[in-house]
Amino acid sequence: MSQTELTPDQNKQLDLWFTYLTPLVAQEHNFTAIRVAARHLAEAILLHTPASADQSTAIRQVWEAVMLANVVIATHPSNGAGG
């Protein structure tokens, strides 16, 4: 049986997931450090693996990891990690 309405917890989670979170100035360093490290990994994957569907998947998963890390940074602004 399917739901006819979202629960308050479901609404809260969707608001968190689908609301643009403007980065704080203090978070810029963390975003940049992760992007730079991911870029280096992506370059290594492209330089040291044959072009293939698996290579494309590896690059996409590096990108996904960056996006998820950005969410962690943006949704936990007071954790003080790295910056």
Image (cartoon, rainbow, N blue to C red):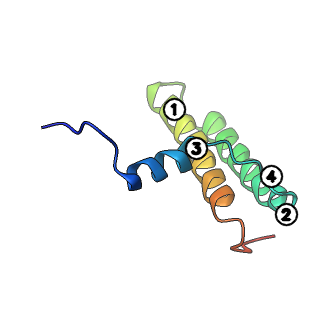
In the image, residue 37 above or below residue 20 = below
Report which residue position mark 2 lands on: 26
Please tell me which residue is depicted at 57% across the width and 50% down the height of the picture: 68
Residue 38 location, x and y as percent? 68, 48
Checking the image for residue 55, the label placed there is 1
Q: Position of residue 41 (x, y in %)?
A: 66, 47
In this view, the residue in front, 56 or 73, is: 73
- Mark 4 vs mark 3: in front: 4
Question: Counting residues from the N terminus, which is met first, the one under dot 2 or under dot 1?
Answer: 2
- Element at label 3: helix
Quadrant of res 77: bottom right
Residue matched to label 4? 32
Q: Do the residues labelled 3 and 1 touch (CB within 8 Å)?
A: no
Q: Nearer the viewer, residue 26 or 53?
A: 26
Disc 4 marks which amino acid? Thr
User: Which tag, 4 or 3, sits closer to the chain's start?
Assistant: 4
Residue 39, located in which quarter of the rendered image? top right
Q: Which amino acid does label 2 sit on?
A: Ala
Which numbered circle lies on residue 62? 3
Q: Which amino acid does label 1 sit on?
A: Gln
Q: Residues within 10 Å of mark 3 (few under 14, many from 20)?
A: some
Number of the front mark, 4 or 1: 4
Residue 71, labelled with which disc? none
Q: How far apart are marks 4 and 3 (CA)?
A: 15 Å
Picture quarter with the N terminus = top left
